[in-house]
Image (cartoon, helix red, strand yellow):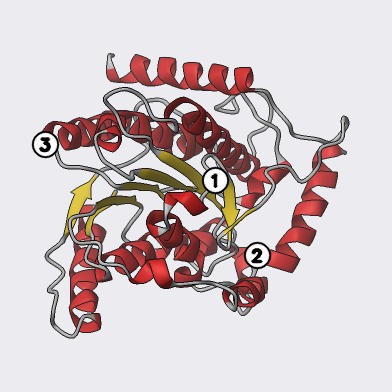
Amino acid sequence: MAHAWRSMLFGVEGWRHYMKSGYEARAKHFDDTCLRRDLTGTHVMVTGANAGIGYATSKALAVQKAHVHMVCRNKVRGEAALATLRAEVAELSGGVSDGANVSLHICDISSMAAVKALSDAYVLKGDPLHALINNAGCMVHERTSTPEGIEANFATNSLGTWALTEGLMPALKRTADARVVTVSSAGMLTEQLEVKDVEMKNGKFDGTRQYALNKRHQVALTQRWARLHGGESEGANDVGFYAMHPGWSDTDALKTALPGFYSSLKEKLRTPAQGADTVVWLSMAPKAVLKNGAFYLDRGVVPIHVSTSFLTGTQYKDEAVDRLASAMSERFNGVVSA
């Protein structure tokens, strides 16, 4: 009953705010000044960068001359996206840039060994990292395990996001004005924080709910990272951590994951660029105007709970998130050290 109530409230919020009309209403009041600044010398890593919101984010930042590190799971699709992006950047810049400031990294975020290899190599190279965009995600409806034996949704959405962020923390902390932006989903509003059965091993598997639970993990971890690493410490720079909901956007990922939903609303969905707008803004806006650890929609902070009542609320304490992080660390280490 509590889940049904939260789902109903989420649906109402979605109809009012998450579609193209919601974005267009808010965009009338946007100040795009910060989006026009030159990002030469800025390094940004974007996961799931070959399509949808990840591609739109990469393109927007590359146009402003950031060195964009596109992280893609599939080599063929990644190389095709890289070539297309470079051509589009050259066209948009009037030939001033050839897109050579964009590079490709092949990494399956659901593979802990691959994530460790990527983060270790980047940290060892010594480049700064001004922004990490955790965008890669999936919604697998059948119970599926990765080759490392991890439930596929949890591996990509939760554990992979945690592992990459933790692994790149040295690069982030050695960089002034660094931030991490995690593309979450307001679908997490329907779920409480799951700490014990994170791979949904008990009971009937539900890929849609597992996805929402994973997105709740992302928001909770964002709060924890802000709590632990957001303040200035000796010998390191403070890092900003932000989660966001892109709205309901017209992407291949949505079309594949929820075909019925996509078909019924496709004329009302946001474009990938509209879905990516807040990601780009969080990557470029002055930290002084941002709230560390917050959850954003259309450049504004929004609540992380759709209900706060005793019976239907989804509140949690810091200690629960700490237990989640410890469980992730144990799961990750168990895999990569095997």
Dot 2, crowdedness within 10 Å: few (<14), some or many (≥20)? many
Marks 2 and 1: CB-CB under 8 Å? no
Q: Earlier in the sequence, mark 3 or mark 2?
A: 2
Give percent across and percent down for residue 73. 29, 48
Q: Read off the residue under disc 1.
A: 291
Work out how far the residue at label 3 is from the one at label 2, CA to CA, in angstroms.
40 Å
Q: Is residue 220 above or below residue 285?
A: above
Q: Read off the residue under disc 2.
A: 18
Instruction: Name the residue type under label 1.
Output: Lys
Q: Earlier in the sequence, mark 1 or mark 3?
A: 3
Instruction: Name the residue type under label 2.
Output: Tyr
- Figure quadrant of residue 122: top left
Q: Secondary structure at mark 3?
A: helix
Q: Choose between 167 and 206: the one closer to the eye.
A: 167
Work out how far the residue at label 2 is from the one at label 1, CA to CA, in angstroms.
21 Å
Q: Read off the residue under disc 3.
A: 125
Give percent across and percent down for residue 17. 69, 66
Dot 3, crowdedness within 10 Å: few (<14), some or many (≥20)? few
Depth check, mark 2 against mark 1: the one in front is 1
Dot 1, crowdedness within 10 Å: few (<14), some or many (≥20)? some
Marks 3 and 2: CB-CB under 8 Å? no
- Figure quadrant of residue 293: top right
